Image (cartoon, rainbow, N blue to C red):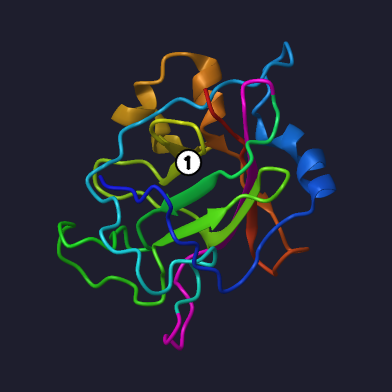
Amino acid sequence: MSLSPTPRLVGRRALTLGSAGLAAASLASGAAAQDGAPTVTPPQVTGPFYPVDWSGDADTDLVRVVGEAAQAQGTVTHLRGRVLDPRGRPVQGAMVEIWQCDASGLYRHPNDRPGLRDPGFQSRGRSAVGPDGGFAFRTIRPVPYPGRTPHIHVLVAAPGRSKPLITQLYVAGEPVNEGDRLFNALRDPREREAVLMRLEPADGIEPGALLAMRDIVLG
């Protein structure tokens, strides 16, 4: 994997929460342990399908692709949270990337298995965090594909850190989680909790959409 030390932010649509909204919602993100100390988000493997092309449309709205008439197939899902340090303070200047397969289980990658990829799904997105460490993406509910439970890949780079955090976020309550090798590699219940997304109805944001709150805590 190669990551430019100063990646270019491509922004077409700002999908952000205000500081107050993110602060209030952070309790729902499950980032804090019972003793009040945030659980550091555990790293996971990059996977074989890290995007090879970040040119063109790679903003925070993965559901719409510039030049495509139809939006992505699948259930629209708003992923929101903050990038925090181990004391729960916002990390200034952080950059967040996400990538995932489309509703048919296919990645936008030349080495993925053959199939008809959804042209309306952007597949990857990148955003700088706000002053409160907040980030927001509009994507689709992740789906399973052969050998894997539904998940979203996340990369977080921050100033002063020698390498980015790479992890994966999983859907809480998904039946096939327990059969997933990478999810099961997390033995500590607190670490498992730190990578789970609880999907809630979000009709107030967008009819028929879901909302997942998940803070990312850098160690």
* Horizontal side, residue 20 vs residue 56: left or right: right
Q: How many marks?
A: 1
The image position of residue 216, as x and y in percent, is: 57, 35
* Horizontal side, residue 24 vs residue 75: left or right: right
Within the image, what quadrant is residue 101 found in? bottom left
Decide which of 3, 107 is in the foreground and name it. Answer: 3
Residue at coordinates 16% horizontally, 58% vertically from top-left? 113
Residue at coordinates 59% horizontally, 20% vertically from top-left? 39
Q: Residues within 10 Å of mark 1 (few under 14, many from 20)?
A: many
Give amino acid for label 1: Val
Residue at coordinates 39% horizontally, 47% vertically from top-left? 5
* Residue 176 is inside the magenta segment: no
- Residue range of the region highlighted in magenta in the rendering: 66-87
* Horizontal side, residue 181 vs residue 202: left or right: left
The image position of residue 181, as x and y in percent, is: 29, 28
The image position of residue 114, as x and y in percent, is: 15, 65
What residue is pinned by disc 1? 156
Q: Is residue 212 visible?
A: no
Residue at coordinates 56% horizontally, 43% vertically from top-left? 94
